[in-house]
Image: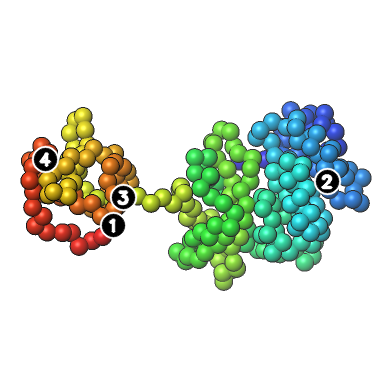
Amino acid sequence: MTRIKMCGFTRPEDARLAVDAGASAIGLVFWARSPRVVTVAQARAIVRVLPPFVTPVGVFVNEIVDVIDGVCRDAGLGAVQLHGDESDDLALRLRWPVIRSVAVDDAFDPQGLAKWPDTIVPLRHVRAIQPGHVVNVTVDRRSFTAVVSSIVPTGDSRTQSFEVIVKAPAVDGLLAAGNTVQVELPLGQPQRSLAVPRDALIIRADALYLFRVSSDQRAERIDVKAGLADGDWIGVEGKLAPGDEVIVRGGELLRGNEKVQVVGMLEEDR
């Protein structure tokens, strides 16, 4: 996807014209020596006129983390652009998505850009990803870990996706600008689930249930909802508790309240 950032705005009406012309990000300069510098109050006024999918970006030059965080919070910014000699460590300490400016001169090394690979994540999964998360990266059949640096807050309204940037270590020249890498990201927040053997479930056209062994050794029907499966086990929701004994074999012959006898236990514990 192609994004356009226009920079140096000091008036809300000018920023709005840029958005109407196709800008997907609006840059606001907070460097005192710039003729386009704005105050936090001016920035807030500009941010208020921006539509939801346009990102206000604060431009800083060799500023400290606390100042950057404070300005972003008070002005309602969505991302940071570092335009000085800031270290990678400073960029990783920021709580905001980061854009790095790069000086292209005789000492420029394009391979250095490869340590900040990015990936596209569907909107339905982006809430499960946070800066600082450790993820697995695979390049040319070799795997290593990297850290999520930032999530670009301007989504693509057509594909319903967001860009996630990760900070990867230098790995024997594997990472080169333009290379395709595989990044494993979480698809949801980790959740604890009660699981039972698949064979315990009894499936009918109008119901899904199993039988629990009650304290007086009787078969007690429990209606459940199925969750995620893992091999021979499946997560369920219902009036069950960890440690309950469920009937794995012969449940389809029961109607409920019959006297039962436990003759064996599965060794695998979930």
Q: Quadrant where the C terminus lies?
A: bottom left
Marked residue nearer the N-terminal end (2 or 3): 2
Residue that appears at 47% across and 51% down: 186
- Mark 3 or 4: in front is 4
Q: Quadrant where the N terminus lies?
A: top right
Residue 137 rendering spot, x and y as whole percentages: 50, 60
Is residue 106 visible to the viewer in this orientation of the structure? yes
Disc marking residue 270:
1
Circle 1: residue type: Arg
Marked residue nearer the N-terminal end (3 or 4): 3
- Determine the secondary structure under disc 3: strand
Residue at mark 2: 29
Residue 84 rendering spot, x and y as whole percentages: 80, 58
- Determine the secondary structure under disc 1: loop
Is residue 231 visible to the viewer in this orientation of the structure? no
Residue 39 rendering spot, x and y as whole percentages: 86, 43
Q: CA distance from mark 2 to mark 4?
A: 73 Å
Residue at mark 3: 194
Residue 201 rendering spot, x and y as whole percentages: 19, 43
Marked residue nearer the N-terminal end (1 or 3): 3
**Viewer-nearest residue: 188 or 235:** 235
Residue at mark 4: 257
Q: Picture quarter containing residue 265?
A: bottom left
Q: CA distance from mark 2 to mark 1?
A: 55 Å
**Viewer-nearest residue: 161 or 171:** 161
- Mark 1 or 4: in front is 4
Circle 2: residue type: Val
Circle 4: residue type: Asn
Horizontal arrangement in the rendering, residue 36 relative to residue 101 (left or right): right
What sort of colour scheme is used for the picture?
rainbow
Marked residue nearer the N-terminal end (2 or 4): 2
- Mark 2 or 1: in front is 1
